[in-house]
Image (cartoon, rainbow, N blue to C red):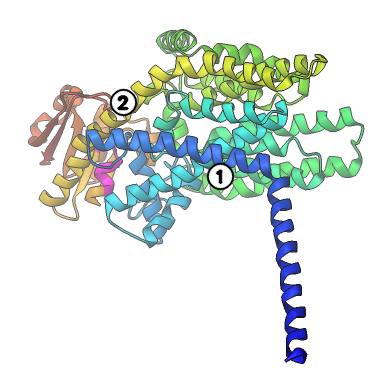
Amino acid sequence: MNETAAPLKGVQEKEAQATVISKKVFVSFFAERKNTLILCLVAIIATSATCIHYLLVLLDWTVIGFNLDDSWIHLEYARSIYEGRAWEYSPGYPSTGSTSPLWSIVLSIIFFFTSDPASIVWGVMIVSWILYFLCTFTVGYFVSDLTESLLIGSVSMIVFVVIPSNTWLMLSGMEYPLFMLLLLLPLILMNNSGSQFDAALGLVAGLAFLARSEGILLALIAVPIRIIQHVNARDFTRKRLVSILSMFGIAASVALPWILYCISVTGYPLPDTFYAKVGVISDTDVEAWNIFWTAFFGTMPFVLMGLILGVLSLLKKRPYAWLLGISMTLLYRFTMPYQALINNSRYITPIFGFLAISCVVGFGVHACELIKSDKRPNARMYRVLISTLLVLLIVVPSVPLYLNQADLFGNATKNINEMQVDIGYWVAENTPEDSVLALGDVGATRFISNRTIIDLCGLVTPDIAHGNFTPGELVNYLETRDADYLIIFGKWHGFYNVLMGQHMTELYRVELDDNRICGDDTMVVYEITW
């Protein structure tokens, strides 16, 4: 009995010791990462709260869907990838109209699980939700590291999710959450001086370009900053120079396949969405820009505060968010001032994000420097005061607009469901499968009906994007392509009636009485008889 008990006791003691060691390792692991885990928890709560809020508002307005028709364009390209005919918006017709080829690649994974449109939309929402969380966490991590305050970092994440149009766009089905994440990651990467981070920056810059063409700004900003960092640190060796310049090589190798594809299809290096939106700037465009930005300054004080306080981030030599916000503002102002404002100013929303970060960082860093210079042992109280002021200056003024945007999110989704999606189902049920549609809004109608389309705006039809057609030539092109149906906004009727009135017969009409997002209250389906 004793001979058996002795080994058993030894085993129990070893197991007890192992348990104690495991507990110590577990406690040590979480103790070392306590702040990161807290930031992660706050990010999950903040992001989930805003996503659930907006989705509940949407479902109160309508069934699940997207608040922009362009969101369906990304899904159509994703389906073309899944079906093995990548970047053919209509079978047999290569296109460079994808604003974000990387986003379409990501979304193509959903098609391995379902082909049901509603389930696909939910899949996009889940992917967007996850990316939104990663964006929010990255903001909090960056700000807490810069201000050396977990509380201010947590507040920055709340600031980020209540930016009025942020959740509206994050859940739109557009590429924004992916694009924003790839722009935010360098805020952390550029804080690390190791040469391995040079390669990571190059990779992220290349991916940012594939997420949206404006991502090229990342490479144009990151490389000069990287060089300045090492010149100031006096570790700018020849080896380090090669490492920094390799950033360009890595970024180029990631972006080059898409650039070469665009050239092979259209002869131009950028997608057709760029050439369709960037053109001659009129005085009216500039006037619209000025009016909108005056309104932004008045309704969202953090925008102006971010422009000014962002300068204070230079104190920490980390002005990345501020520089990205300013560079994107200048880019849109001098290339597409009006186009950047349409559809709820969706191109401007990333700028709001970077200026909000700049506002928090500028205010937080300056205030924290004052705390450090104060010998009194009540620094925590000061951090609470700083965080409270940030909430009062940024969060409180943003809440009314944030709530309005939630209703706009539901209303806009209802509009798209009742117009473009509805017409897509009508076309699918009432036209032959080999029909060719000529239309202006090419997203939901093409995806739902699965018909071959001709894009009257040229976004996904290269011939029209670069053909410089006269009105008569456009009609001839539609006849050459055997267009069977014309689907246009009611306000376009007069133009097409003059061109081809004798060939048009109205078949179906949709009229909205609460339109907030579509190009017109009315959309009409005409049969064409040549």
Relative placement, left or right, of 275 versus 187 is left
Q: Which mark is residue 8?
A: none
Displayed quadrant of residue 251: top right
Q: Which mark is residue 408?
A: 2
Pinpoint residue 193: horizontal percent, then vertical percent: 81, 39
Pinpoint residue 483: horizontal percent, then vertical percent: 20, 44
Q: Which mark is residue 259?
A: 1
- Find the magenta span and give its range: 439-447
Displayed quadrant of residue 373: top right
**Please, what is the three-letter code of the amino acid marked with disc 1?**
Ile
- Quadrant location of the N terminus in the rendered image: bottom right
Q: Residue at x 41, y 61 (%)?
A: 84
Q: Residues within 10 Å of mark 2 (few under 14, many from 20)?
A: many
Does the magenta-highlighted stretch encompass residue 135? no
Relative placement, left or right, of 134 versus 64 is right
Pinpoint residue 447: horizontal percent, then vertical percent: 28, 48
Pinpoint residue 401: horizontal percent, then vertical percent: 39, 18
Q: Nearer the viewer, mark 1 or mark 2?
A: 2
Q: CA distance from mark 1 to mark 2?
A: 36 Å
Does the magenta-highlighted stretch encompass residue 446? yes
Q: Residue at x 14, y 54 (%)?
A: 432
Displayed quadrant of residue 218: top right
> Residue 159, relative to residue 212: is it above or below?
above
- Are the residues flagged by discs 1 and 2 in contact, CB closer than 8 Å? no
Q: Residue at x 54, y 43 (%)?
A: 210
Assign a secondary structure to mark 1.
Answer: helix
Which sits in the foreground, 380 or 313?
A: 380
- Quadrant location of the C terminus in the rendered image: top left
Visible residue check, residue 136: yes
